[in-house]
Amino acid sequence: MTEIQSGSNSVYTGLWIDHHRGGRVFGITLTLRNRDATVLLAFLTVLVGIAATRSWRIWRFALHSFLTWRTQKQTPSKAQRRLQVMLRNNETPASALLNFGSLPFMTDRIFNSRDKGNSLMLFVIALIHLAGFKAAAILTSQIVFGSEVTSKSLDSCGHWIARNATTSSTLNASAVMDLSFLAGQELQFNSTIDADNYVRNCYPQGVSREVLDCGTFMARSLPVYTMNNVSCPFDSSICLNGTNSAFQIDSGNITMAALGLNIKHATKLSIQRRSVCAPIKIQPFLDNYQDSRNLSTLSQDEIIVKYSFYKYEGKNFTYLYRFDNYSPGYDLRAAPIVSMIQDVAEPLQPRPNDTTISLMLLSAPNMVFLQPSDDPWFAAHDPLNSTSVPFYSMDYAVNVLACDERARFCSDITQRCQEWNSLASFDEPVDLATLGGDAVKDFESIEAIYLMTSIMRLHLGSNFLAYSIQNRKAAALQAGRYATNTIQYKLQPEQWKVELSYWFSMALARLQLDVFGTIEKPPGVDPAVAINQWKSNKDLQWMCGRIKFRSAAHTSLSAFGVFFVVTAVILLMVVSNMDVLLSLLCKRLAFVRQWVETDSLALLKMVEEFEEKEHVHTYEGEYISETSDNPNKP
């Protein structure tokens, strides 16, 4: 999964707006490398510690003033004065907590029950203050949004395809050697492999040990909803099990934000992907049959069968099968039908006609099963009597699954959805009345809806179930997990539905990968043989730098949270100096005067003055006593 690992080189570091988190205020996000984010968080934690000290300075001034106010009509007792002194000179809530906590247990007689109650009140307030700021220091980590990041605008960002896309109808020797054709095959094959690997590792129906990174996309997996026994989307005469035998697979509403688009209304605009599939009969599409009787180059055991799914020759979806006794394993072929629907064979035309079709053809003439299989796509009931072990062979030479493929856009703004459209409808106009309604009038909203629908249509063109398994052949079969060589040991109940559900998950994963892959050029792609479809469209190129994903090497934080913490600390530091300002401007106020008097330096000065007076008094007393004992001395 090269694309997912390459995302770390496309991360934008700095400030950006996350529209999913609240727009231009609460959505402002700061992305940093993990090391820098750790340093910033440590700095903010230190700031909270400083804020705790400065906040306690405010609280102790307020509490000191409160105690002064309670004793303003009477002379404060020694205990009250001691509480005021302790409150005034405990600079931190932790030291105040220890001092006030010890007072109720002192045996000093100067502390009566009321004084001990006051000390207990101060202890509780200091405890709440300390616990509150400890919690605030811990909660500082909540400003971290996680590893969600946005892409930066690179010159190579966009949707890359082969420069000269070649269809199978024009395929020839020179086209095979064309480097552009080979680049297209590589891009298609790599995308399918990446989608398969991602589903195996990260989707609920995966079968891997999850050794790859499943945390890159905004949504680890997209939902898959199934419904049995729905109406066959084709002529009921070709549906193998009757009119109501189809299997419906639906994604539900997938928001653009879940796919990684970071743009206005991305959380309110969604896409819904649906496939309705049914096993169909192959006989109506038989075009030609040849064996040794009408083609001399064939041996007696060889036949060539030609199937056509179009009304006339010349279309690119005609299949030739050559069957012999040496055909190994499964032969799985798949392709979408994207031509005008009126050109498709009549029984295959969907109801209604506005759709696209995926056909999956499975052949296994020499595959044997240990048990009979009633699965319509793996039907096997013919016993092989030539072996000692009872084996069974498939009932039909070719089994076909046909899927009616559709998608539509829905809006939470209007609570409405568009009509179901073909996956290949690139030129459909934006239906603002359905998706935006009267609520969308500003140019930014209109442009956002236009861009999101345009990007999705661009990727839906390669989102057929057939593209999920194209060129993969038997490797795309989940039944292959229980097969060895030409022996199928086990099949799950309704194996054809298991296969379809898995391929549908691959189609959804392909959507995720395609959106993510636009952040930079796919690795190994030569710009000389590939073209960036966004380069010619300035509107789409504007989306460069607006794809959200997750990067293990980066951390995103709330810029509002960082600003709030820093501003709160600065504000507390300013307000915590109000006692200094009041002591300069309002010295006559009783609570201010006592605040100044109970300062440790003021108390020290009082002690020094008292000691000097005591020293002078003692000296004068000694001098008087000496003179009184010697009356004859002058």
Image: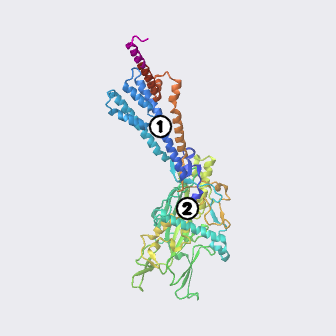
Residue 144 position in % (x across, y down): 51, 49
Regarding mark 1 in the picture, which secondary structure is present there?
helix
Q: Quadrant of the N terminus?
A: bottom right
Real-space Cα distance between discs 2 and 1? 46 Å
N-term mark: 2 or 1? 2
> Label 2: how many residues lie within 10 Å, few (<14), some (14-19) or many (20+)?
few
The residue type indicated by label 2 comes to Gln
Would residue 123 be visible to someone looking at this image? Answer: no
Magenta-highlighted residues: 619-634
Pick out the residue farthest to the front: 632
Q: Which is closer to the viewer, label 2 or label 1?
A: 1
The residue type indicated by label 1 comes to Thr
As for residue 628 lying within the magenta part, the answer is yes
Q: Which residue is mark 2?
A: 5
Residue 541 position in % (x across, y down): 65, 56
Would residue 563 be visible to someone looking at this image? Answer: yes
Q: Give the vertical position of 546 relative to 491 (above or below).
A: above
Residue 284 position in % (x across, y down): 53, 75
Task: Give the quarter of the image for residue 169.
Answer: bottom right
Disc number placed over residue 53 in the picture, else none? 1
> Label 1: how many residues lie within 10 Å, few (<14), some (14-19) or many (20+)?
many
Q: Is residue 490 left or right of residue 44?
A: left
In front: 200, or 231?
200
Disc number placed over residue 497 in the picture, else none? none
Q: Give the vertical position of 462 relative to 286 (above or below).
A: above
Task: Give the quarter of the image for residue 164.
Answer: bottom right
Residue 25 position in % (x across, y down): 56, 44
As for residue 291 lying within the magenta part, the answer is no
